[in-house]
Image (cartoon, helix red, strand yellow):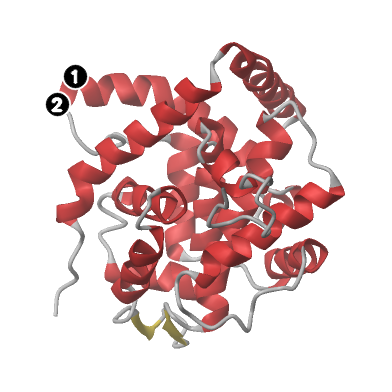
């Protein structure tokens, strides 16, 4: 049986579906989202075309279930085209008087590149196995197929994993900046916020419980998953003690998930995404005319 992201060999299951369907795939998500906001075009689009500063987590709740469904759901290709079409009207001029548009090829590719990086990063940090060179190329090729589902320009897409890594680090070193949206996200990750809602639904008691459980690990996971290059460029505080704590957290995931049946792990992620998606799908932010 072939898969939508396979290499053409019937006996080769999809690595992308395997790793994206694992709960651990979401752990580097906050770091990926932060690097998206550091891109000038994406940061400007989020600032001007969403309610990010009032409800920064709403963008995650609305977007991630739909984006992961482009991999995991049977109608993934149709969902990908719908996501693309939601970005057609997102454009304008940023605070530095630079024009931007969400579907500008390099801008749209960077958003996807951070998700590609997220999948690889989750395996690197939170899984006990190490990808072989062949596995890395196969997984990267599947992320390119994933990107092709959006029906946008393939011009920015690097041809192989080595070229992807080189371009990714080049953007991190030269293109990213501390946009207003990124600065706000860093502030929340570092200090928390009494006014930010972490949960897409639930009463005050559930929200307080979620804040207690999530806020402290949020900083550790967000900053720990970030590339050292990005932490250094933007003077993001990170100490030897932070690194030791993050290393212990990563080890706990690598060892702890050995006791979780893979079927339960994958079902839990799908149910969580379906639940959040069902709560937010009809509540998409509509900017003022």
Above or below for 11 versus 82: above
Residue closest to the far right: 133
Seen at 26% across and 22% down, the residue is 208
Between 112 and 268, the one lying in front of the other is: 268
Question: Along the horizontal axis of the image, is 267 left or right of 173?
Answer: left
- Label 2 crowd (10 A; few <14 / some 14-19 / many >=20): few
Secondary structure beneath label 2: loop
Secondary structure beneath label 1: helix
**Residue 6: % across, % down:** 63, 55
**Residue 200: % across, % down:** 24, 39
Distance between mark 2 and mark 1 Cα atoms = 6 Å
Seen at 84% across and 43% down, the residue is 132
How many callouts does the rendering have? 2
**Residue 255: % across, % down:** 68, 15
Question: Along the horizontal axis of the image, is 174 left or right of 64?
Answer: right
Q: Which mark is residue 203?
A: 2
Tags 2 and 1 touching, CB below 8 Å = yes
Above or below for 85 versus 245: below
Above or below for 82 versus 128: below
Question: Along the horizontal axis of the image, is 52 left or right of 219?
Answer: left
Question: Along the horizontal axis of the image, is 55 left or right of 239?
Answer: left
Between 149 and 96, the one lying in front of the other is: 149
Q: Which mark is residue 205?
A: 1
Which image quarter is the C terminus in? bottom left
């Amino acid at each position: 049986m072939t898969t939508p992201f396979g290499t053409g060999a019937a006996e080769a299951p999809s690595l992308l579906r395997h790793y994206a369907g694992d709960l651990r795939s979401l752990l580097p998500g906050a770091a990926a989202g932060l690097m998206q906001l550091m891109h000038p075009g994406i940061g400007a689009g989020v600032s001007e075309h969403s309610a990010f500063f009032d409800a920064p987590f709403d963008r995650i709740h609305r977007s991630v279930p739909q984006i992961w469904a482009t991999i995991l759901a049977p109608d993934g290709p149709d969902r990908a085209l719908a996501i693309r079409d939601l970005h057609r009207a997102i454009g304008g001029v940023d605070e530095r008087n630079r024009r931007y548009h969400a579907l500008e090829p390099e801008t749209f590719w960077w958003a996807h590149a951070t998700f590609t990086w997220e999948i690889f990063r989750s395996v690197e940090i939170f899984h006990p196995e190490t990808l072989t060179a062949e596995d890395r190329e196969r997984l990267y090729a599947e992320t390119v197929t994933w990107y092709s589902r959006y029906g946008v320009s393939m011009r920015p897409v690097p041809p192989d994993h080595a070229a992807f890594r080189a371009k990714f680090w080049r953007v991190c070193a030269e293109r990213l900046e501390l946009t207003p949206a990124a600065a706000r996200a860093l502030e929340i990750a570092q200090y928390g916020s009494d006014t930010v809602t972490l949960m897409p639904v639930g009463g005050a008691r559930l929200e307080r419980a979620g804040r207690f459980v999530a806020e402290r690990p949020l900083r550790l996971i967000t900053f720990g998953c970030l590339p050292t290059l990005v932490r250094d460029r933007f003077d993001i505080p990170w100490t030897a003690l932070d690194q030791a704590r993050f290393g212990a957290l990563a080890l706990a995931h690598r060892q702890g998930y050995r006791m979780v049946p893979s079927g339960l792990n994958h079902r839990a992620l799908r149910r969580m995404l379906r639940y959040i998606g069902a709560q937010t799908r009809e509540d998409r932010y509509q900017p003022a005319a």
